[in-house]
Each structure stands twice: as C-alpha cells, then as structure tokens.
Amino acid sequence: MHDLVAFRSKHLARFQAEPALFSAPGRVNLIGEHTDYAEGFVMPAAINFATLAGISPRSDGKIAIYSENYGEERAFAAGDLPARAGKHWTDYPLGVLAILAGEGHRIPAFSLSLSGDIPLGSGLSSSASVEVATALAVLSLIGATYPGPVLARLCQRAENEFVGANCGIMDQFISANGAKDHALLLDCRDLSFRLAPIPANVALVIANTMVKHSVAGGEYTSRRAEVEAACAVIASHRQGVRFLRDATVDDLARWGAEMTPNSLKRARHVITENLRTVAAADALEKGDLAELGRLMAEAHASYSKDFEASCVEADAMVALAQDLPGLIGARLTGGGFGGCTINLVEQSEAPEFVEALAGRYAAQVGIVPQIHICHASGGAHRLE
Ligand code: GAF
C-alpha cells in the first residue's frame, strides 16, 4: 500500500517543489495469453498495486528522474534526451518522452519521482505502469490529454520502439483503461472493449512463484516469432489472414504439416485461446463461474503444453491450488516463464486459501511464495 503523504513529502524534500501526483496500476490477466500481438482477445483486470508518479516543473532545462524502487536519481538535458535505450530503469520513462516528442510535443524541464509497489519481474506489468504513470504526469505538465486507448498505444510504442521489448497492447491498455471491480475483454484488433463485472464474492488471489519473468527476455520474442511463422503459412494459402486472429483450428488441420512442430503447437494455443477468452467473458457476464474456472484450467494446460511458456514452479502452483476449498479457477498469468498465477477464489475462503497454498508450495518447491488477495481497480488517474 502506498503512503501518499510520504511520497509527496519526499518529492518536496528532494526537488523543493510540490508535485502533481498520478497513479497507474499493474494488471493481472484472467485469460488470453500471447493473443494480443496476434490481434486477438485478452481479459485482464487492473489491480491494487500501482506506480505513483510525482511531477513538478523546473527552470534549469533539466529532467531529473528519481526511482524510489532503485534508490537512484538520473538527470538529462530536456533539449538533448537520449535517442537510444541504455538498458537501465530510466529507459521506460525516457521511452515515453521519446514517443511524445515524436508526436510533436516539446518536452519541458521537470522533476519526476516514481515509486511502485508492483513486485518487479513478477509478470504484473510494472513496466507498463511506469510508462502510463509517466505519460499522464508529463502530459499534464504539457497541458495535453489523450483518450485512454491512444495513451496506451503511445506507451506500447515506447516499449516497442525505445526499450526494444516486442510486447503487445494488453498491459498498457489495462493500466490506462481498467475499471474498478471489472475485468476488461479487449479486442486487440480495433481496441474495442467491454467490461465484465467481477462478483463481489470473488477474490483475485495472485500467487508469485518468485521465479523472475521478463518480456525483454528471449523466450517471449521467440514464441512471438513462432506464432508469426505459423500465421505466414496459413496466409500463403488463405487470403485475408493477416494475424492468427483470422485463423481457425481447421486451418491447422489443413496446413499444420507445413509448419515446424513448435510453430504448430504455438498456433494451436493462440487460436484456441482466443475462443476461450471470448467464452470466458460470456461466462463471467452470466455469472457462470464454474465454466470460467473450466476455461482457465484449459487455458493453463494449453499455455503449459502447447505454448510451453510455463515452468515447473508455475505448474506446481496451479496444481497445488486445485483441491483447495473456494478455488474457482487457476492459471499462470502474463508473459510466461515465471511470474504469478491468478487464482479466482471465493472471497470468504481466500485467507485460508492463501495460507494453504503458500504452505504447500513452500513444502513442494522449496521457495516461500508471496501471495496477495487483490481486487480489480480503476485505471490510471490523477490523485487529488
Ligand atoms: C506480456 C506482454 F507485455 C503482453 O503484451 C502480452 O503479450 C503478455 O505478455 C502475454 O499475454 O505481458
């Protein structure tokens, strides 16, 4: 939980100026993994872990950025910002500035403080929340606003074009556009979305395997390449297929033999995951939690076996949750290869669920996990 008063006064003490404050949440994805860059469907929710940004103008032509998480301050000349990433935490805020400058904004001098309580490398989109919080803060100083979906696209571009991570739109989109107590079914083709209420008696229990995950890592990129290679095979036979969003399991039956075995499996995951994600939104809207849980289990099996993006620890965390009282559905969430599982759990059972799962995981895997009972939160906003 953030201490806003402390955050504000630290900015004041460090930079001798009152900051305007902004908050951008992390996210958990209920279902729809590695589908966003295939122009498919995802259903994340923003969570009550966030990055705070405090910003105040300066008159010395400098941009000073302080990260409370890294305990480090860096300064740049506003008129001569780095053109390339430096493999440093400042790449995320600097990437946003580069994209805003490219959109024709003059970037003013300012002091920016950042502080996040999203566990880093846990697959809960700390990077996207830094980008969105920075964008909101800087835009407020410039006096410009963008609709949430446009803001998300600009932040995704910061990550793609500046940081050099080939992510899709999901994380930035939900950080900018999340809604309290709702999951958001996003069509990553046209960015249209609908909100599905999460019942008050359902808790989002997020279990950190403590195995670090990174979108910038090679596995994410190689999976994406395999997905795109599968799509190219189908596109060579069937006009109008631009992304796997346009493909069907029937296409795989016909032309799968022309793909590498891995590409075929990755494509089967993406194509079936799109179907599951839309079905999961319908189930949530109808209050059919049993069906939602079934789809989450199917999604995890597909993510683990066909997409091979799980790991021993995440498979264990999902398996160990299965017979615990109150479980509705469990799966590995986010980019894969570590990070967190999402467990939908009956609220009244959640505290016991957390204790039992933590105990089982520590006993079997030998790692003490961090497990949080979260709720779906609103998207990025200015704090008064
Ligand atoms: C990461 C990426 F940043 C998202 O765009 C998405 O592809 C996700 O992995 C997998 O669903 O969070």
Image (cartoon, rainbow, N blue to C red):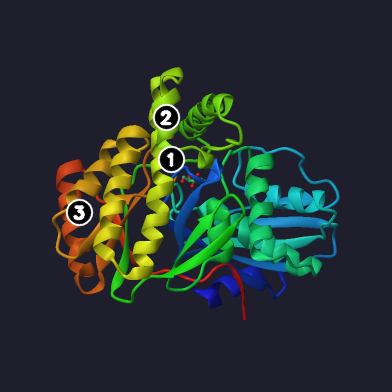
237, above or below 54, in the image = above
Whichever of callouts 2 and 1 sits on the residue coming sooner in the sequence is 2
Q: Nearer the viewer, residue 248 or 27?
A: 248
Using the image, determine if residue 273 lies above or below residue 353: above
List x then y, in percent, for residue 372: 32, 62
Please tell me which of labels 1 and 3 falls first in the chain: 1
At label 2, which amino acid type do we have?
Answer: Leu
SS at circle 3: helix
Q: Residue at x 30, y 34 (%)?
A: 305
Q: Looking at the rendering, which quadrant does residue 236 occupy? A: top right
Which amino acid lies under the numbered mark 3 shown in the image of this protein? Answer: Ala
The answer to whether residue 286 is visible is: yes
Q: Check residue 271 in the rendering and tell me which mark sits there, or answer none.
A: 1
Q: Using the image as rendered, state which of residue 184 and residue 369 is in the foreground.
A: 184
User: Could you give the CA–CA distance between mark 2 and mark 3, rounded to whole angstroms?
Assistant: 33 Å
- Label 1, ligand 1: CB separation under 8 Å: no
Which is closer to the viewer, label 2 or label 1? 2
- Residue 309, numbered label: none
Q: Going 31% across and 52% down the picture, which residue do you hit?
A: 296
Question: Amino acid type of disc 1?
Answer: Ile
Cβ(mark 2) to ligand 1 < 8 Å? no
Q: What residue is disc 3 on?
A: 321
Q: Which residue is mark 2?
A: 252
Q: CA distance from mark 2 to mark 1?
A: 9 Å
- Mark 3 residue CB less than 8 A from any atom of ligand 1: no
Name the secondary structure under disc 1.
helix
Q: Secondary structure at mark 2?
A: helix
User: Picture coordinates of residue 334 (x, y %)?
Assistant: 42, 48
Q: Is residue 265 above or below residue 315?
A: above
The quadrant of the picture occupied by the N terminus is bottom left
